[in-house]
Image: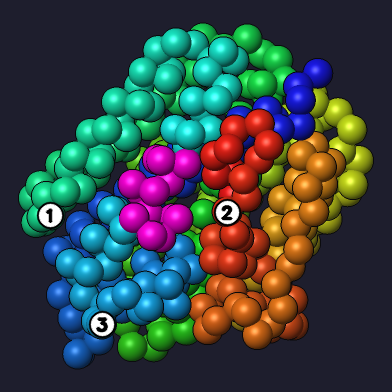
Amino acid sequence: MMLSRVAENVYWMARYLERVEDTARLVVATHHAMLDMAPVNDVQPMNWEQLLAITGSREEFFKRNSRADEQQITNFLIRDDEYPGSILKALHFARENMRTTRELFPREGWEFLNRLFLETRSAGSRDFHAANRLEFLELVINECLRMTGLLDSTMVRDETFSMFRLGRYLERADMVTRILDVRGALMLTRHEDVDRPLRNALWLTVLRSLSGDQMYRRRVRPRIRGVDVLAFLLKDRAFPRAFRYGVSGVAHCLEFIGGAHAAQGIIARIEEQLYLADITRLADNTGLHDFLDGLQILLGELHATISRTYFNQEVEKPSPTDLGSSPVGMSSRGRTSTATLNRCSRPPVTTPFTGGTSA
C-alpha cells in the first residue's frame, strides 16, 4: 500500500501535468478561433476573456492586471508566477511533487518533466508574440504527451499508476464541463445573434479545445452540429477526453485502489445525471448551465471525498463571501462548485513528506 502523503503527491502531480496540457491546448484553440472568426453584425461571440472564466481566474487576474487583452491574459495563463494555475506555476508544482516520489516513476519521466520546467521558465523570461507563443505552446503540449505516453507505456499497473490516472481523469472531466459551461452555454444564450455557419464554427472551436474535432468527424458525423457535439463530449464512452470516459476512468481507478465506497456513490450520481440528461433540450440552452454546474458540484464532492479517503486531509468549502464573481465559481443554488475547490480558493498545502505544494 502507498503512504497517504505519497499518494497525494502522485495524484497532484498528475492533475497539474494534465492542467498544463489542457491550458496550453485551450490558448492555442482560442488563438486560431480568433483569427478565423470575424465579427458578424458587430457580434464577436468569442474573446480572450472567456479563458479567465473557463479557468475560474477572473478575480485573480484583475488583482494584478488592468485590462483583459490578448497579451495580458496569455501572459497570465502561461507565465504568471503568482497564479497557481499558470502553465509555469503548474509545472513547478508537478515537478516538486514528482521530485519527492521519483523512485516510483521511470527515470526518463523525471528527466522529461524537469527539462520541460526549465525550458518553460527560460521561455517565460522572454516577451511572447503570437508566433513564438504558438511555437512554445505546441512544445509544451508535445512534451506533456511524451511524458504521459512514457508513463503509460513503462509503469507497472499498481497503486501508483492508478493514482496517477485518477488525477489525470478527474482533471480532464473538470475541463470538459468548464469549456462547455463558458463557451457552449454562452454561445447558445446568444444564438439569435449568430448565424448557423458561425455557430457551427464555434462548436468546432469547442472540439478543438479538447483535441476532439477529428475524432468527432470519424465517430459521429462529418458535419458539426451543436447537439451532436454536446452528446459526444458529455456521453461518449470511447473518446478519452469525453466527460463520461473520464468519470468511468476515475471509477476504474478507485475500484483498483479500493476503499472509496463514498466516492463510488458520487460517481453513481454523476452517471445517473448523464443517463437522464436530455441532450436535445440542453442543446437548445434549456438548463445547460444548471446541468453543467451540477456536474461541477459533484466533481468537487468527488475530489473532497478522494482527499479524505486517501490523503487523510479535510477539504473545507469556502463560504460564499470568499468565492468572488466568477460565473463558474458558484452554482445557482448557492453551493460551492468544483471551480472553487479545484481552481480558485484552494490554498497551497504543504505535506509533511515533501515540503512541497500539492494543492
The residue beneath circle 3 is 66
Which quarter shows the N terminus? top right
Query: In x, y percent, where is residue 2?
Result: 76, 22
Query: In x, y percent, where is residue 336?
Result: 70, 72
Front residue of 208 and 164 = 164
In the image, is residue 318 above or below residue 1?
below
In the image, is residue 335 above or below residue 267?
below
User: Mark 1: which secondary structure?
Assistant: loop
Front residue of 34 and 325 = 325
Q: Quadrant of residue 50?
A: bottom left
Callout 2 amino acid: Pro
Front residue of 243 and 219 = 243
Pointer 3: residues within 10 angstroms few (<14), some, or many (20+)?
few
43 horizontally vs 315: left or right: left
Of tags 2 and 1, the one toward the viewer is 2
Circle 2/circle 3 CB separation < 8 Å:
no
User: Mark 3: which secondary structure?
Assistant: loop
Gap between marks 2 and 3, in whole Å?
26 Å
Give the extent of the magenta segment. Answer: 81-93
Residue shown at 89% from the left, 33% from the top? 259
The residue beneath circle 1 is 128
Whichever of callouts 2 and 3 sits on the residue coming sooner in the sequence is 3
Residue shown at 54% from the left, 50% from the top? 232
44 horizontally vs 209: left or right: left
In the image, is residue 296 above or below residue 110?
below
- Residue 231 inside the magenta-drawn segment: no
Circle 1/circle 3 CB separation < 8 Å:
no
Q: Is residue 131 visible?
A: yes
The residue beneath circle 2 is 348
